[in-house]
Image (cartoon, rainbow, N blue to C red):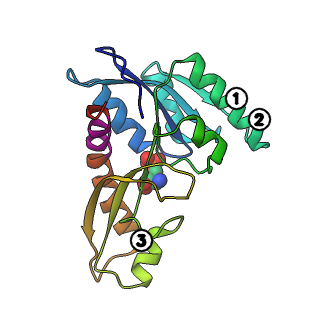
């Protein structure tokens, strides 16, 4: 489990590959008076990820990781995590799968947000698959990361109703709104269990 660091704030690294709207929400939350964490580091595999601009805007350290070799990529990430004394990793739209070895090294200290009601629709294209199966509900889940894809212990979930008129885009937007509400809440829950 997480090592308690007394009254000091928990240092968090957020891993992104794209827009970074969940990253933004976590940064906003970290600025609140009662927040128990700081976002100290942004890691990305994608030099074109839109969310990277939050690093300059909020003066957060960023690291773009070359993923041509997973082994050296993860070695570099681990170095950065240690250098920046990171206690917890939040995955937020990070499109690379972390190796078993990496996850072992950060056991119980990696969480992820996934746009479905897990255990349903692990992996990609969650909204389209939910629509194709004529589900009445979809949603989002924050969960611990273990060595099986999208299968770790669930921390928080939010159901979202699917309408007959829904398209993939419409549903994705509605679910993303809920993601922005549950990710900070789930993180607080994780931190309060320290
Ligand atoms: C979110 O839908 C998240 O659940 C999924 O990737 C998307 C990332 O969006 N894992 P953003 O980059 O945080 O805007």
Vertical placement of residue 155 versus 71, above or below: below
Quadrant hosting residue 22:
top left
Quadrant hosting residue 47:
top right
Earlier residue among tags 1 and 3:
1
Q: In the image, residue 93 lies at what x, y percent?
A: 50, 49
Q: Dot 2, crowdedness within 10 Å: few (<14), some or many (≥20)?
A: few
Distance (Cα) linking label 2 and label 3? 33 Å
Q: Are marks 2 and 1 in contact (CB under 8 Å)?
A: yes
Q: Is the magenta stretch mostly helix, strand or loop?
A: helix
Magenta stretch: residue 6 in it?
Answer: no
Q: Which residue is drawn at 61% across and 27% down?
A: 63
Q: In the image, residue 79 lies at what x, y percent?
A: 66, 23
Q: What are the residue bounds of the magenta stretch?
A: 183-190
* Quadrant in which the N terminus appears: top left
Q: Residue at x 52, y 30 (%)?
A: 42
Vertical placement of residue 179 versus 86, above or below: below
Quadrant hosting residue 127:
bottom left
- Judging by the rendered image, the residue that carries numbered circle 1 is 76
- Please tell me which residue lies in front, 77 or 155: 155
Distance (Cα) linking label 2 and label 1? 6 Å
Mark 2 lies on a secondary structure that is helix
Vertical placement of residue 148 versus 51, above or below: below
- Judging by the rendered image, the residue that carries numbered circle 3 is 120
Mark 1 lies on a secondary structure that is helix
Residue 192 circle label:
none
Q: Tell me: 182 left or right of 150.
A: left
């Amino acid at each position: 489990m997480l090592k308690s660091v007394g009254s000091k704030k928990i240092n968090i690294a957020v891993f992104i590959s794209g827009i970074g709207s969940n990253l933004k929400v976590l940064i906003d939350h970290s600025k609140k008076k009662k927040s128990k964490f700081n976002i100290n580091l942004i890691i990305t595999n994608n030099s074109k990820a839109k969310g990277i601009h939050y690093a300059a805007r909020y003066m957060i350290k960023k690291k773009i990781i070359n993923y041509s070799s997973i082994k050296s990529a993860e070695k570099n990430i681990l170095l950065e995590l240690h250098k920046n004394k990171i206690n917890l990793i939040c995955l937020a739209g990070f499109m690379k799968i972390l190796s078993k070895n990496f996850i072992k090294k950060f056991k119980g200290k990696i969480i992820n947000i996934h746009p479905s009601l897990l255990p349903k629709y692990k992996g990609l294209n969650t909204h389209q698959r939910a629509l194709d199966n004529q589900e009445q509900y979809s949603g989002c889940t924050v969960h611990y990361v273990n060595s099986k894809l999208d299968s770790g212990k669930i921390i928080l979930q939010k159901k979202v109703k699917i309408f007959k008129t829904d398209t993939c885009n419409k549903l994705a937007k509605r679910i993303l709104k809920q993601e922005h509400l549950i990710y900070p809440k789930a993180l607080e829950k994780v931190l309060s269990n320290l």
